[in-house]
Image (cartoon, rainbow, N blue to C red):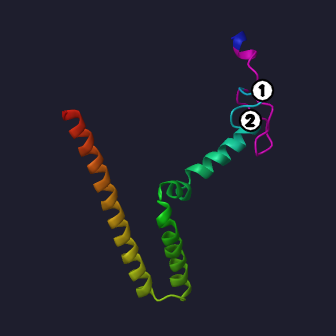
Amino acid sequence: MDKDKNKKICAATKKNGEPCTAPAVRGDYCIAQCPESAEWRRKGGENSSTAARLEKRMPLRLRPIFDQLEKAVAEVYSGELDPRQAQAMSSLARAMVTVMEAGTFEERIQKLEEKLEATKR
């Protein structure tokens, strides 16, 4: 019981003005109130957003096409672009992605076949 009395409590205050009652684990603050936590959460939020994940996975060649499609969505919404034109753009972009994926799979299969052939020797 004495052990619990000696535990340090967070020095920060909650949003409602009350003192934080969480145990201090990083200096005088709890993990949620620690000044470094805000920076960690900000960086984590940036890197875990859908846009950030998409940016990392998308081939450089497809980024301008994605930007054009994104612009087309806004233009259709505002009435500047005929929805049929946007649909055609979307279909062409999907065809391009399909061709690129097929090429990537073919490349991977070829590498695997070469590795398999090398292990047979």
Is residue 8 shown in magenta? Answer: yes
Q: Residue at x 24, y 37 (%)?
A: 118
Name the quadrant of the C terminus.
top left
Residue linked to disc 1: 27
Picture layout, residue 50 above or below residue 71: above
- Mark 2 Cα within 10 Å, few/some/many (few <14, many 20+)? some
Question: In the structure shown, which secondary structural element does the residue marked by tag 1 occupy?
Answer: loop
The reply to whether callout 1 and callout 2 are in contact (CB within 8 Å) is yes
Question: Extreme front residue here?
Answer: 121
Q: Main SS type for the magenta part?
A: loop
Q: Amino acid at mark 1?
A: Gly
Please indicate whether residue 16 sits to the left or right of residue 75 in the image: right
Q: Position of residue 36 (x, y in %)?
A: 73, 38
Q: Amino acid at mark 2?
A: Cys
In the image, 50 versus 102, the foreground residue is: 102
Residue linked to disc 2: 34
Q: Residue at x 53, y 82 (%)?
A: 77
Q: Which residues are magenta?
A: 4-24
In the image, 71 versus 30, the foreground residue is: 71
Label 1 and label 2: CA atoms lie apart by 8 Å
Question: In the structure shown, which secondary structural element does the residue marked by tag 2 occupy?
Answer: loop
Q: Which callout, 1 or 2, points at the residue further toward the start of the chain? A: 1
Is residue 21 shown in magenta? Answer: yes
In the image, 25 versus 73, the foreground residue is: 73
Residue 66's mark?
A: none
Picture layout, residue 18 above or below residue 68: above
Name the quadrant of the N terminus.
top right
Q: Position of residue 28 (x, y in %)?
A: 79, 28
Q: Position of residue 74 (x, y in %)?
A: 55, 79
**Which quarter of the figure has residue 16?**
top right
Question: Extreme top residue here?
Answer: 2
